Image (spheres, coloured by chain):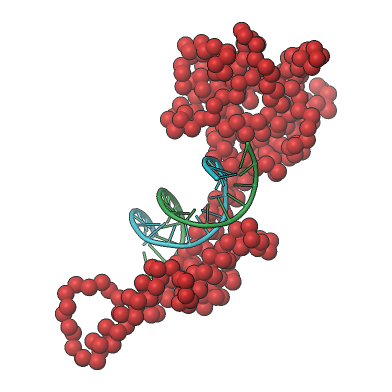
Chain colours: A red, B cyan, C green
Amino acid sequence: MLQENMLTLPFDKPPPTRSSSLFRTSWASSQLVQSVKTEPGRAPEESEREDDERDGEEEEDEEEQAGSLKIRGPHKKKLSQARLERVRLRRIEANARERNRMHGLNNALDSLRKVVPCYSKTQKLSKIETLRLAKNYIWALSEILRTGKRPDLLTFVQTLCKGLSQPTTNLMASCLQLNVCSFMSEPGEESFSLYPAYQYHHGPEEVGSRSADSGRLLRPSGSFCGPYKALYDSPSPDCSSPLDAVTLSPPINFNGIFALKHEDSVDYRSCHYGLRYCSISQSSSAELGPYDAHLRDQFYQVQEKSNKPFQSHTGGD
DNA sequence: TAGGCCATCTGGTCCT
DNA sequence: AGGACCAGATGGCCTA
């Protein structure tokens, strides 16, 4: 009965390997089944329950044989063999349901991953990063609706990256075909962080007040602020959770340089936002909506600004 | 090797 | 009673 239950685990997955979850599931189930079959090496609590159960049966037998009730004070209710089996079976079924439930949750997260602006089949966002990015994305879009202004591309990216880890931010940059190029900081040279959330936690008056060589200069380059500045003037969604502030990764410090990414480490075809720019770059303005055309223009502007220092940097060598 | 991420198991709680 | 949901514990895998 238990064996049968184990074999009908509701998975529609490839054959189990040692590293697959199905393998682990089957293994865990078989372990449990084995423990039910009172194999040696079973968990202590299992054997304890078996002992309780034996004791219970013996006591019941004694009572039946005596033909009278013996009052021995309060004692815990012993489970019959059949009931014990039922409890264990229910536990196995509950485990299967729980697995299904979590699979459903993961499927929903996968769906979410596909609609946030950074989707890569090869480098999946973690659950927490997916949720954070989705929150930022919703917030950014709602700000666009609220202000009715077109976003500055770089600021939009910064907004999306609020509170995200550095690897995720880098992935975002890759998805947007923007590569974070870190150059040697020069004294007095302005740099900015991809983490505007950080500035919120310190208040606007502190923005830009830190020295560049501290690696924490927070003010974005003014030329990139543009119409999307309204986003900075609004409360950050990240302010709601103190935990977010605590767990916020250190801001990336670079000199405000983005450059086109040439390596193909990310599946751009499946990249939601990147695809937009890929397709935009191959279209004429007439084929684009006003918003797409605007974004494309901004993208080119950022590209130009980004490549300038890069070219001068590499050209100087 | 430590830390992050993940899947799974498990017991508790709440609801039907 | 049983299912859904939740959070803690645990162990495996992967990467820096």
Q: Is residue A148 above or below residue B9?
A: above
Location of residue A107 in the rendering, given as x and y in whole percent from the top left corner: 60, 50
**Does residue A90 appear left or right of residue A79 in this picture?**
right
**Residue visible at 16% across and 80% down?**
A71
Q: Is residue A110 above or below residue A289?
A: below
Residue A156 seen in this snapshot: yes
Location of residue A153 in the rendering, given as x and y in whole percent from the top left corner: 67, 21
Q: Is residue A222 above or below residue B1?
A: above
**Does residue A40 appear left or right of residue C15 in this picture?**
left
**Does residue C6 appear left or right of residue A149 in this picture?**
left
Query: How many numbered marks have been drawn onto this rendered protein structure?
Result: 0
**Residue visible at 67% across and 39% down?**
A119
Location of residue A124 in the rendering, given as x and y in whole percent from the top left corner: 65, 42
Residue A145 seen in this snapshot: no
Quadrant containing the C terminus of chain A is top right
Location of residue A266 in the rendering, given as x and y in whole percent from the top left corner: 73, 37
**Residue visible at 69% across and 25% down?**
A180
**Residue visible at 58% across and 39% down?**
A130
Corner quadrant of residue A23: bottom right
Q: Which residue is more in the foreground, A28 or A222?
A: A28
Q: Is residue A108 above or below residue A38?
A: above
